Structures are given as C-alpha cells and as structure tokens.
Image (cartoon, rainbow, N blue to C red):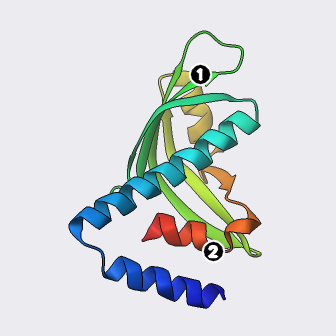
Amino acid sequence: MLKRFTLIVFLLVGSLSATDLSTMDSFRSKVLTSAVSLYFQARGYGTVENATVDTTKKTLNFILAPEGETQKLFITIGSYMTFTIDNKEYLVLQKVQTNRVWLNRIFADHMKEGIKIPLGTMSKGVGSLILNI
C-alpha cells in the first residue's frame, strides 16, 4: 500500500505545473511549520510565531515566545532534513542560531546533531516524502 501511495505521489509531482509546484511548496511549508510548532508547544518550550520556510534552501526562521518569558526568541534553522529509524520518521533541525549568545553556545557545544523532532509512526514514510520532494 505504501509503495503504491509513494508511486502515486511521485507521478503527481512529476506532472505538476509551476503553479502546482508553488502550491506543493506552500503545503510543505505548512507541514514543516506545524511539526515544529507542535513540538515546541507540546514540550512547554513556548509558542512558535511568524514561521517562514525556504523549502529550496531547506531553512526555517521563526519567533518563539518562550513559556514564562516576556522576551521573544528569534530562531534561524540553517538546514533541516528528515530520516527514518526503526520505521519512525524524524525531522532534524540543524545549524540552529538564536538572538541569545549563550543559547547559541549551547547549540554549538551540545547540539551538533540538531534537534530531532518525531514526525510520528502514523506518517509511514509520507512525511519524509512530502518534505523532501
């Protein structure tokens, strides 16, 4: 079933016009923004605002209103990718930069592999497919 779905998605993407590709890009941006927003909010880190995605460069910028803080955090994700381990998909945010020097140092020292966000077992390979087309 998954192979058939993957083939259908590839056939659809192959036949997309420039307008359709723009729509697909918009869809990927929404999927990525939703995954990041849910991750940060579910863990009590804060609320994601004003997310902008460049799916060509695979970069992401957003503002985080940290839980319990008055000052907002500006975050730039220099790259993102997806991968699967044991049939579980993950979105990895890498090259994280913020408007806080101390936080940038933590990311540089301890988060070289990036922030790993589970896309869920329900996506069954579709999350990676959508985000990487």
For this view, does 39 lie left or right of residue 91? right
Q: Earlier in the sequence, mark 1 or mark 2?
A: 1
Query: Which quadrant of the figure contains the C terminus?
Result: bottom left
Q: Which mark is residue 65?
A: 1
- Residue 55 lies left or right of residue 87; in this view the side is left
Residue 85 in the image: above or below residue 112:
below
Identify the residue at horizontal 61%, vertical 39% (top origin).
Answer: 37
> Is any part of residue 129 visible from this angle?
yes
Query: Marks 1 and 2, how far apart in space?
Result: 31 Å
Mark 1: give few (<14), some (14-19) or many (20+) Cα within 10 Å. some
Seen at 33% across and 82% down, the residue is 14
- The image shows residue 107 at horizontal and vertical percentages of 59, 38
The tag on residue 125 is 2
Residue 55 is at least partly visible in this image: no
Amino acid on which disc 2 is placed = Gly
Location of residue 36 in the rendering, given as x and y in whole percent from the top left corner:
59, 44
Spot occupied by residue 121 in the image (x, y as percentages of width and height): 75, 67
Three-letter code for the amino acid on which mark 1 is drawn: Ala
Q: Kindly identify the residue that appears in the image at 56 percent across and 69 percent down.
A: 128
Q: Secondary structure at mark 2?
A: loop
Q: Nearer the viewer, residue 95 or 68?
A: 68
Against 6, is 127 above or below? above
